[in-house]
Image (spheres, rainbow, N blue to C red):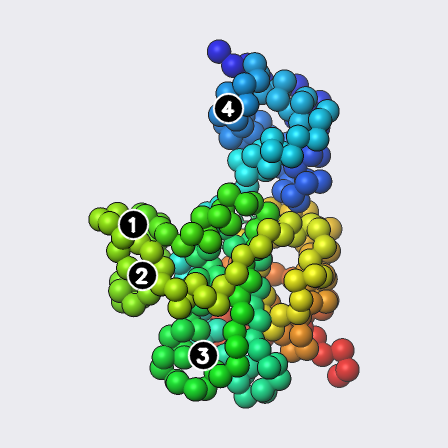
Amino acid sequence: MTDSLLSKQQYDNFRDFLEDSCGIVLGDNKHYLVTSRLNKLTHEFSFDSLSTMLDELKRKNDAKLKERVIDAMTTNETSWFRDVYPFELLKENIIPEIINTNKPNRFRIWSAACSTGQEPYSISMTINEFQMKSPGKLSMPVEIVGTDISNTVLNLARRAEYDQLSVARGLPEEKKKLFFSCMDGDRWKLNDKVKSIVRFSEINLLQNYALIGKFDLIFCRNVLIYFSADMKSDILNRMAKILNPGGFLILGGSESPTGYSRAFDMVRFPKGVVYRLKDETS
Ligand SMILES: C[S@@+](CC[C@H](N)C(=O)[O-])C[C@H]1O[C@@H](n2cnc3c(N)ncnc32)[C@H](O)[C@@H]1O
């Protein structure tokens, strides 16, 4: 049987490794979480125990093992139109403002930490619906960039085929009919129109992302909760730098820039709260 017990030193080393490589902060008592998520990998990589695998991880820079360990420790939980209100705000408040101010000659949206694609594709469906209901109003090109630290989830996102269970999570029936086609009894394929304005790229939020260009809107939801206060500040301040003037930031329901970054003002719309880049000139 595989020995899954870790010494305090090994656990602390692993905590440091995880925080340094992807920002996730593990509490003091998460031994069970670590062993339950990593034991399978121990077998897969043919180590005789979890501690041997973690020692190897520390000693050698094995990119494949590192990637798989990070994959196993991250939570990829997501759903279509998660929390609903961000997509209503997008349709009712943000798109009209983008049109009225007529600022950008294209509308760029970043879905940071997008997991298997439900978030950027929900944004794309919202934009498609707006364009169908109000033809010609949003005439500028729209580009949505979905990023994540994990190539495994990004490959699933790029494929844009979902089983019955994932399709059922949050996707209203009328949107399923409008935007998906059934491949066989159990799998659903997203249509090309929704896919065509979304592209995916591997980005670790801890690292530099200045190269992906400027955005008018950033969705960064349900990922900052895993990071330390310093990391949250650093990420939010760097996101502020790549927002166009007046650009918006949408965070998860339990996340806020308050206490971490002064770069944003809170904006209350009837359906919920978003954050807007502060106008430094006022
Ligand atoms: C809980 S999911 C959130 C997905 C989506 N934003 C939503 O709200 O439904 C968190 C995602 O963050 C990604 N993630 C974790 N650490 C990351 C990092 N340092 N950089 C980029 N993505 C990261 C994980 O791979 C995972 O797919």
Residue beneath disc 3: 92
Classify mark 3: helix, strand or loop.
helix
Classify mark 2: helix, strand or loop.
strand
User: What's the CA distance linking mark 1 and mark 2?
Assistant: 10 Å
Q: Residue at x 44, y 73 (%)?
A: 127
* Mark 2 crowdedness (10 Å alpha carbons): few <14, some 14-19, many ≥20: many
* Res 180 label: 2
Query: Of the residues shown, which amino acid type is indicated by label 3?
Result: Glu
* Mark 4 crowdedness (10 Å alpha carbons): few <14, some 14-19, many ≥20: few
Q: Which residue is drawn at 71% across and 61% down?
A: 210
Q: In this view, does 127 lie above or below 57?
A: below
Query: Of the residues shown, which amino acid type is indicated by label 2?
Result: Phe
Which quarter of the picture shows residue 6? top right
Give the number of callouts: 4
User: What's the CA distance linking mark 2 and mark 4?
Assistant: 35 Å
Q: Which of marks 4 and 1 is nearer the N terminus?
A: 4
Residue beneath disc 4: 44
Q: Is residue 214 above or below residue 10?
A: below
* Res 187 label: 1
User: What's the CA distance linking mark 4 and mark 1?
Assistant: 28 Å
Query: Of the residues shown, which amino acid type is indicated by label 4?
Result: Glu
Visible in this render: residue 22? Answer: yes
User: As rendered, which of 233 and 3 lies closer to the eye?
Assistant: 3
Which quarter of the picture shows residue 233? bottom right
Query: Of the residues shown, which amino acid type is indicated by label 1?
Result: Arg
* Mark 3 crowdedness (10 Å alpha carbons): few <14, some 14-19, many ≥20: some
Badge nearest the viewer, 4 or 3? 4
Q: Which of marks 2 and 4 is nearer the N terminus?
A: 4
